[in-house]
């Protein structure tokens, strides 16, 4: 029984530590002004300074992270469907095929968003070098 209490306390301490770490990260992220999708088109059209291009790059990095998370979710679902394919029998496309397709689209979108972020960071470096 004593060992069980120690295990529970250990898990509780780990959980609290994780929650505190996540909370600090959320506070740091919330301090930076985030562009919204509706604002992006205007910012791209009007961006003239390095800081503006860095804001746009941050938007695309956030988008890339969101797509990567979506990719991981579909990958997990695909693995689950592949683990027991007889549970959900069907012809092509199977549920696993569907998830594989969405996983691929999310990966492609993440790569494209990251490429856009890198391009805006490159523009920002060029503009900073001219000043």
Image (spheres, rainbow, N blue to C red):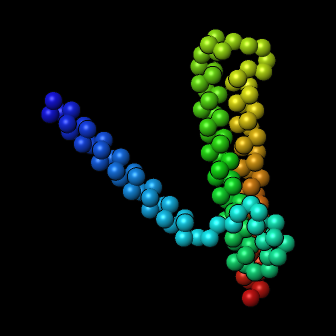
For residue 13, side relative to residue 71 (left or right): left
Residue 123, given in percent of the width and then of the height, sits at 78, 73
Give the residue furthest to the right: 45
Give the residue furthest to the bottom: 131
Residue 105, given in percent of the width and then of the height, sits at 76, 40
Residue 110, given in percent of the width and then of the height, sits at 71, 49
Residue at point 73%, 36% (across, down): 102
20 relative to 39, above or below: above
Residue at point 72%, 43% (across, down): 106
Instruction: Check the picture and name the quadrant holding the C terminus.
Output: bottom right
The answer to whether one can see residue 121 in this image is no
Instruction: Check the picture and name the quadrant holding the N terminus.
Output: top left
125 relative to 18, above or below: below
For residue 71, side relative to residue 120 (left or right): left
Residue at point 50%, 66% (across, down): 28
Closer to us: 10 or 111: 10
Closer to us: 123 or 71: 71
For residue 90, side relative to residue 72 (left or right): right
The answer to whether one can see residue 28 in this image is yes
């Amino acid at each position: 029984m004593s060992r069980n209490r120690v295990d529970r306390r250990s898990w509780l301490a780990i959980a609290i530590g994780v929650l505190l770490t996540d909370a600090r990260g959320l506070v740091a992220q919330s301090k930076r002004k985030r562009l919204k999708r509706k604002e992006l088109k205007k910012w791209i059209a009007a961006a003239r300074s390095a800081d503006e291009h860095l804001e746009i790059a941050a938007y695309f990095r956030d988008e890339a992270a969101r797509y990567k998370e979506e990719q991981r979710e579909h990958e997990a679902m695909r693995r689950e469907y592949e683990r027991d394919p007889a549970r959900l029998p069907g012809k092509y496309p199977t549920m696993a095929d569907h998830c594989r397709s969405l996983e691929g689209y999310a990966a492609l979108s993440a790569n494209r968003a990251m490429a856009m972020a890198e391009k805006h960071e490159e523009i920002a470096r060029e503009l900073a070098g001219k000043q």
